[in-house]
Image (tube, helix red, strand yellow):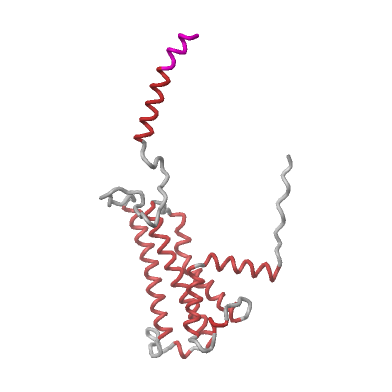
Amino acid sequence: MSETNNNTLPANSNEQSTAKAQDTNAPATSGNKSPAWNAADPTDGRTYYDYGSKYPPCTRVQIFLEATYLALILVAGFYFLVWIFAEDIALYHTELKFQDLNIKLQQMAAFSTSGLIGGAMFGLKYLYHVTARGLWHEDRRVWRIFSPLLAAALSTMIGILIDGGIVHIADSATSEKQNLSTSFVSIGFITGYFADTALAKLQEIATVLFGSNLKAPPTQQK
């Protein structure tokens, strides 16, 4: 019995020392898991002078086209924003000025434009983050394409709900003493950029108006 223990102890010691050596030499990240992104150290898990793209050329073209699409939406949004705040600028190839619209159409234009800008900015921020982390994939393309458009539509409807008194905003935000266009644009941009929060607010309003139809999940039988 004692001989068996004496023979096996050195083997176990060698295995433990080998395991310790392997743990010491193991990299900080293993497998396909991407390292956690830290705003204070935005290295994206790369070492010094590791500047090459990890994506194949065909994927880089797709990412570039998506970024171009979002950038064009952002530029178009700012064009309409200038049209809203400028008094003597008419739309391209038209004589229509923002001041020529009635107050309801001005409200819709301001909310939709600023919501489009907010949605495009959020989409661009999301795109460059997931691209740098190596998390970009094609299945999110539908979301990246339609997110700014949905943000614009959501901002417009939030503006209509505010005008109808269903959604209450602080009186100072829509005071007649202030520029109404500035108030509309401010609220619309916040709605478009934080579209998920705005949708959660709409869910609360729907629950108040129509009640909750959710049923408690059935109790699991043991």
Q: Position of residue 88 (x, y in %)?
A: 38, 90
For residue 121, side relative to residue 160 (left or right) = left
Of the 4 image quadrants, the one containing the C terminus is top right
Q: Position of residue 70 (x, y in %)?
A: 40, 67
For residue 34, side relative to residue 53 (left or right) = right
**Magenta range:** 1-9
What's the magenta bit mostly, secondary-structure-wise?
helix
Q: Up-down: is 97 above or below 146? A: below
Q: Say if the magenta span includes residue 175.
A: no
**Residue 97 figure quarter:** bottom left
Q: Up-down: is 36 above or below 214? A: above
Residue at the image point whose x is 55% and y is 78% from the top: 159
In the rendered image, the residue lying farthest to the left is 49
Q: Nearer the viewer, residue 128 or 37?
A: 37
Q: Up-down: is 187 above or below 4? A: below
Q: Position of residue 8 (x, y in %)?
A: 44, 15
Q: Position of residue 6 (x, y in %)?
A: 44, 12
Q: Say if the magenta span includes residue 6.
A: yes
